[in-house]
Image (cartoon, rainbow, N blue to C red):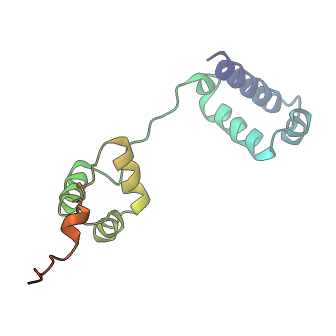
Amino acid sequence: MIYKHALATFRMFSSQLVINGNATQAQIARAFGVPLVTVKRYVKLYREGGTAAFFAPPKKRSASKLSLPVCQEVQALLDQGLEVPEVGRRVGILANTLHKAIRSGRLRRAKKKKIHPRQAQAPRANAA
């Protein structure tokens, strides 16, 4: 946690140098060995949110594709035994998104039926 606070402080301080006119964005990027686009990103953050923006907790994103009705529809298709890529095609969601939801426990796969080796073989005719 100390590392995150120190990193936020560094980003804020380097952005202040640019905002106050003490250094250019390119000078900060060269001096600290960070990409110029990173310096620009944090200068923009400082301009829009001030110093508090660097220490605010990150915003959490929700699963916009998998709302409750969509989850229920997807789960019903999975329960019918359809494979994840096929379900994704039917509902218009990437299979990768569905796999992520399965890993996180929001969805579950249907159990595959196991066939025992003896049942898989054709029955033998009695030789008389």
Judged left or right of residue 63, residue 26 is right
Percent coordinates x, y for residue 26 in the rendering: 87, 42
What residue appears at the point 76 percent right and 30 percent down from the top-left corner?
15
* 58, 70: nearer the viewer: 70
Q: Where 90 falls versus 103 (above or below)?
A: below
What residue appears at the point 25 percent right and 58 percent down from the top-left corner?
112
Percent coordinates x, y for residue 102 in the rendering: 34, 49
Would you say residue 63 is visible in this rendering?
Answer: no
* 17, 101: nearer the viewer: 101
Judged left or right of residue 32, residue 100 is left
What residue appears at the point 90 percent right and 38 percent down from the top-left corner?
27
Percent coordinates x, y for residue 4 in the rendering: 65, 23
- Residue 106 lies in what quarter of the image? top left
- Residue 98 lies in what quarter of the image? bottom left
Judged left or right of residue 87, residue 2 is right
Q: Going by the picture, which residue comes out furthest to the bottom?
A: 128
* 114, 109: nearer the viewer: 114
